[in-house]
Amino acid sequence: MDTYKKRGRPSNEAFTDSVQAGDFSSSFSSLTRGSNFKKKKETSPPIDELEKGLLEGNRSALARAITLIESNAEHHFQGAQELLHRVLPHANQSIRIGITGVPGAGKSTFIESFGSYLCNELGAKVAVLAVDPSSKLSGGSILGDKTRMEQLARNPLAFIRPSPTSGKLGGVHRKTRETMILCEAAGFDVILVETVGVGQSEVIVRDMVDFFMLLVLTGAGDELQGMKKGIMELADTIIVNKADGENKHAAKKTKAEYEKILHFLQPATKGWPSRAYVCSSLYEEGIKEVWEVIQQFIANTQTSGVFEQRRREQAKEWIYSMITDQLHYRFFGSPVVKEMLPKIENDVIAGNRTVTAVVEELFRRYTRE
Ligand SMILES: Nc1nc2c(ncn2[C@@H]2O[C@H](COP(=O)(O)OP(=O)(O)OP(=O)(O)O)[C@@H](O)[C@H]2O)c(=O)[nH]1
Ligand SMILES: [Mg+2]
């Protein structure tokens, strides 16, 4: 997989994904403009046009389709699902890569270098998504990401999308997975998902990608102590970033220390012993080597069948996470639960009733609703 044959029509338009999540009406107005479009109450999105644009690899159609997926409005939900249904046969063909690491590890800078390498050297179409459950505001991390991926954002083969926010029709989880489908349908070859490794998000992302990498920094002694073994067990490779200037030597030492630990851990992917490497995202050193590791990973796991097996398991896992999402939103959104909760809290805090008893009653009333 040295070079990429372009699927769909290559798109030469400049990166235009400036639409904020939730702002759907303004984002698709250009599609309806000129077609007797009178200001009426919000129209259903033009699914046919979105589908066509998407399959042609048109990035503004992709941006609008993602906005539709991200919309929390009920009347967009059906359209979004219809669109997904139609493009589903064109999905599933990209390589999905997750990148995690503590804030400041250099994830965005790595993606800038790595993504540019894939686009410029291999002619690959690269989509960048972010999962940031901590971001409450729509497009919370776009500013940081766009300034740190300036070069990539201007690349005609790249597409960058900030974190979606959650809402009653499903959380960040659903939106990111569905966004991946849209990107694949639009002919993107590689999907990079950035997530801050500080909580649950890395587990969520591990469950939606083929290859998962952990970016770390030098000064390992303390960090290695503090780092949860769990996150290392999720990683298919550990990359010690910022291996440049005076830090180069320390980075190599850190790499050796991580390798020692990895040796004792259960590999994240069956049959693939995770290794550590160094790179400098800022100076674009070691970037090509990371891609070589990924290629090797793909070749190995495709041969062994682990690649396909993981995708099948992920699809199954998706069902259950959707169910959990739905239960959560329906339960906490129900009027009876909303009404009962404050009183129940007081009762428990005051020691008048047990938690088991109140939760039991809550569910009884909820299911009768
Ligand atoms: N010297 C050096 N600095 C780097 C390198 N990679 C990133 N940096 C710097 O480290 C800082 C943080 O980089 P980001 O790419 O924003 O880190 P991040 O992991 O995406 O951070 P969050 O998105 O906030 O979690 C920036 O000032 C970068 O310029 C590198 O390879 N070498
Ligand atoms: Mg970042």
Image: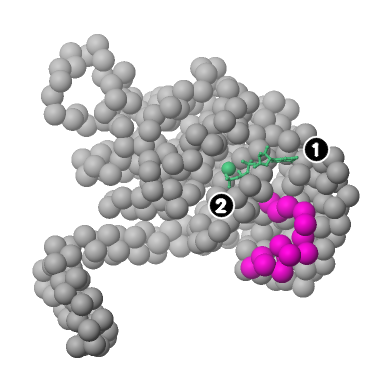
Range drawn in magenta = 215-228
Residue 308 vs 34, above or below: the answer is below
Going 48% across and 40% down the picture, which residue do you hit? 141
Q: Which residue is the site of mark 1?
A: 285
Check the image and report above or below for 138 versus 7.
Answer: below
Residue at figure coordinates x 73%, y 39% from the top left: 281
- The residue beneath circle 2 is 196
Q: Quadrant of the N terminus?
A: top right
Which labelled disc corresponds to residue 175?
none
On the image, the x and y values in percent for residue 343 come to: 16, 74
Residue 232 in the image: state x and y as whole percent. Answer: 67, 64
Residue at the limit of the structure toward the front, as seen here? 350
Ligand 1 visible in quadrant: top right
Mark 2, Cα crowd under 10 Å, few <14 / some 14-19 / many 20+, is many
Q: Is residue 294 visible?
A: yes
Dot 2: element:
strand
Magenta residue check for 153: no
Labels 2 and 1: the sequence-earlier one: 2
Look at 20% across and 71% down and name the residue there.
341
Q: Nearer the viewer, mark 2 or mark 1?
A: 2
Q: Quadrant of the C terminus?
A: bottom left
Q: Label 2, label 1: how many angstroms apart (C-alpha)?
A: 23 Å
Q: Is mark 2 within 8 Å of ligand 1?
A: yes
Mark 1 residue type: Glu
Q: Is residue 175 above or below residue 5?
A: below
Determine if residue 158 is in view: no
Instruction: Measuring from the top left, give residue 217's x and y in whole percent.
Output: 73, 52
Q: Residue at x 63, y 53 (%)?
A: 101
Identity, as a three-letter code, of the amino acid under mark 2: Val
Picture colour scheme: one colour
